[in-house]
Image (spheres, coloured by chain):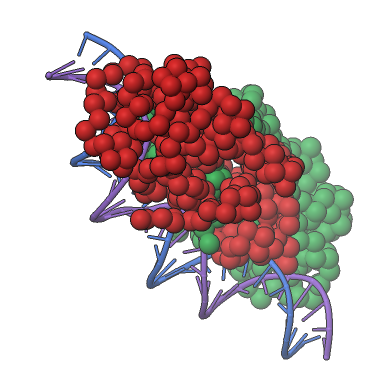
Chain colours: A green, B red, C blue, D purple
Amino acid sequence: MKISKQFPVNALRVFEAVARHLSFTKAGEELGLTQTAVSYQIKLLEDLLGESLFLRRPRRITLTDAGARLAPKVSEAFELLSAAISDMRSTSEGTLTINATATFASHWLARHLGIFQLDNPRIAVRLETTQEIIDFNKTEADVAIRVGQGQWPGLRAHFLMRNHFTPMLSPKLAESIGGVREPLDLLKLRIIDPGDRWWRIWFTAAGYPDAELDLYPRSKMGAQALEAAAAVAGHGVAILRPEFYQDDVAMGRLIQPFELTCEDGSHYWLVYPEARRHAAKIRAFRAFLTKTLPSFEERAPLE
Amino acid sequence: MKISKQFPVNALRVFEAVARHLSFTKAGEELGLTQTAVSYQIKLLEDLLGESLFLRRPRRITLTDAGARLAPKVSEAFELLSAAISDMRSTSEGTLTINATATFASHWLARHLGIFQLDNPRIAVRLETTQEIIDFNKTEADVAIRVGQGQWPGLRAHFLMRNHFTPMLSPKLAESIGGVREPLDLLKLRIIDPGDRWWRIWFTAAGYPDAELDLYPRSKMGAQALEAAAAVAGHGVAILRPEFYQDDVAMGRLIQPFELTCEDGSHYWLVYPEARRHAAKIRAFRAFLTKTLPSFEERAPLE
DNA sequence: TTTCATGCATCAACCCTCTTGATCCATATA
DNA sequence: TATATGGATCAAGAGGGTTGATGCATGAAA
């Protein structure tokens, strides 16, 4: 059974407009309906209620007692509804929830988000960090920053920046073995998360495809930020995206012993549900990225 | 454009139910819809608002912030709506508006309506009288008493009583011409509304088809009650439905000089819109008539 | 672990509601 | 009397909304 059959909300909506205008034609104009449609809906409602709601006088209609009793309450209810909707609209238009990896959040967003907020004083920002993959059906977020290939079904993706990596460690730790001169020197140290494929890629690129990383199955941290912290503390060598740790380098807490950086095909992307692409706040965020990030563009490096 | 497109009341209604049950399936059951339909409506609403309203967790769903903000207001609005409707229903179920001719109202209804009200203490009665034909589109009435053939398009008719008539006058007036012995005596008196076809019918039946009534084009009153009043006052002879004036006869204010009564094929009927036939108050009124009026039956004497 | 049960998403197909446009009718206005 | 306004009625058509089957993910149970 159709829903409108049990509870004629549409008919009520039409009734409300007619009661206000006291004219089928005018009400139709307001609602974008023909006079016929209005007539039909009113008749429907009247039949359902078993009561006439309007008296059909020549050239004008009048509310019956029943209609007059009903009208104000229906009006109120619909005002409430539309208020609720527009209120919700403006509130949620007003806060942008960004879900990012901890790494990206702390090393890039935290540093640049100020500009977005200056440009969009009416949009509050909520920044959430989760480990890797998020599902917009399961997490409340308007946009997300993901690392990947830039292809997710149902999601629109904009390229943010390439992701490359290189070993980094604390200067003290480097000194402890008399400095790091060549890649194999690193193997004298504890490797933070040797299972990370990045290590293999990097050593291969450096000319040592057979470096015995597996021998050191130490900590598995998962989040780059944590590995970096461990490296700063001198617990070992981590493989990191150098741009994110320029500060640490400048402050002498980390060094990047080799120029060589590698990529694994995964990069940073801004993603959001296809269907939400026209939301004002998402537009604003795109505009901010376009302005702030030279490499920002939709669906860029498909390699 | 469909109305639901601009303002998704149906979707909101579904949303309200889902928010209450926190389950698409349950909500569907409540509304008499399939889970699919519910899913569809929610998605519709979410797309329209550009906001997720529910988080799809395994085996249960949760309101998002946006959804949680929206739900209570929508609930309130719909409660208001359904309250308004049921309130209106019960109020108008509670008063029966009867539209009758002044004659019938004062001579039959007024006398018997007490029984109806005893039987139906919860139904208030509003008795309105208008001259003849009423249009349910133009007058607020639940039922009407009409004189006619019992055939009106769109209306259901129940036979109430035959309508017959005979001359009546005040005893004083009769004495003034030495008593009324035979029909032609009446012509010595002023005929109240000689244009009334009833006179011609009656005189013809009495054996005087050529009685010169047209000679006395006096008052045209229209309502039987007024003619009766004129007759009581001794202003002339009226042609009336004798049953309605038994009191006046008993009190010596009117006499019925001849036994002969005539009919013109028009009788008294209870009528109401076909569509309203199931209304409780109309049922109650029918029950009352069945009980009170032996001749009461639906669509009876088609002659 | 494997299997089962629950609950939502997706898809294609169909029905019926709702809308449209034309026409008719009644009445108020000029 | 002629014209304009506003609602009712009718047939026809579109598409919104519904259904039922199916798939998928997860939690509970075996």
Picture layout, residue B188 above or below residue B149: above
Q: How many marks?
A: 0
Percent from the top left, x then y, of residue A162? 56, 51
Residue A193: percent from left, percent from top: 77, 65
Q: Nearer the viewer, residue D5 or B147?
A: B147
Nearer to me, B197 or A7: B197
Residue B24 placement, left or right of A172: left
Estimate the x, y position of residue B251 in percent, counting from the top left: 62, 28
From this viewpoint, is residue A237 visible? yes
- Of A148 and C4, the residue lying toward us: C4
Residue A142, by quadrant, is top right
Kindly identify the residue that appears in the image at 32 percent across and 24 percent down: B187
Task: Tell me: C29 left or right of A178.
Answer: left
Please determine whether, in this image, residue B36 is positioned above or below residue C30: below
Q: Quadrant of the N terminus of chain B?
A: top left
Identify the image quadrant of the C terminus of chain B. Answer: bottom left
Image spot of residue B182 (x, y percent): 36, 33
Question: Between B295 and A288, which is closer to the camera in this rendering?
Answer: B295
The single residue placed furthest to the front in the displayed view is: B178
* Above or below, comparing residue B249 to residue A218 in the picture: above
- What residue is at 53 percent from the left and 53 percent from the top? B296
Identify which residue is drawn at 28% across, 18% down.
Answer: B217
Q: Residue at x 76, y 75 (%)?
A: A214
Residue A163 seen anywhere in this rendered image of the structure: no
